[in-house]
Every structure is written in structure tokens, then in C-alpha cells.
Image: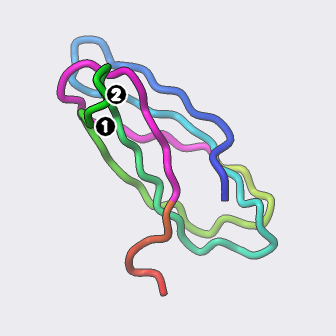
Amino acid sequence: MQVLAQRFYVEEGRSKVQVVAKVENTGKAVVEAVEVQVVLRNFRGSICGNNMILLEDLQPGEVRSFDVGVTRHGGVATATVELAQPESAP
């Protein structure tokens, strides 16, 4: 699994950031579930928001787009998208 692209934008007048990204299943097997973790950081590098979603049943070679809303606490300089195995997975 890999993140192909990502971008974020701040919703004006709200304390929310939308993160839009694409992931690809680069393997040869179905990925039953992958946890997508999004972390917002301010200009000092401190975390100012986070959220996660679960993507399920990604076929080999499949590219999937998604978006995640994240509540922000202060200014946002960067948004990082990371992939992890869900905790409940074997």
C-alpha cells in the first residue's frame, strides 16, 4: 500500500480541514482493511488535529480516492497521511 497524492484545504469560517488523498494497493493480494491516519501540524511542528478512517477491500492494483475531515486547533502548516494495519486485524 502506498499514498499516491494528497492535499488539504481549510474550510473558511470553520475550524475544519479537508484532506483529500489517493492510495494504491501495490501488492498482489486483496487488502481487507487499512487504517488511514491523518495528522495536522502547525508551523512549529506540533500536532493541531488528527482523524482516521478505515478503507476496506482494496483489490490488487486498485487506486482509491478518499477525503477526511479533521477539526483543527490553530493554524495548519502540513497534513500527513499515513497507512497502518487496523488494531483489530490479526
Q: Which residue lies furthest to the top in this view?
A: 12
The residue most toward the front is 44
Relative height, residue 22 to residue 53 (above, below): above
Closer to the camera in the image, 47 or 20: 47
User: Which residue lies under the disc numbered 1?
Assistant: 70
How far is mark 2 from mark 1, CA to CA? 5 Å
The residue segment tinted magenta is 65-83
* Amino acid of disc 1: Val
- The residue at the point 54 percent across, 70 percent down is 33
Q: Which residue is drawn at 40% across and 30% down?
A: 18
Indicate yes or no whether the magenta region holds residue 22: no
Residue 66: in magenta span:
yes
Residue 72 lies in quadrant: top left
Give the side of residue 1 with respect to residue 72, left or right.
Answer: right
Tell me where residue 77 appears, x and y as whole percent: 37, 21
Q: Are marks 2 and 1 in contact (CB under 8 Å)?
A: yes
Compared to 28, does 65 lie above or below? above
Residue 36 pos. (x, y %): 47, 54
Label 2 sits on what residue type?
Answer: Val
Q: Which residue position is annotated with label 2? A: 17
Sequence-wise, which precedes: disc 2 or disc 1?
A: 2
- Could you tell me which residue is drawn at 31 percent across and 37 percent down? 70
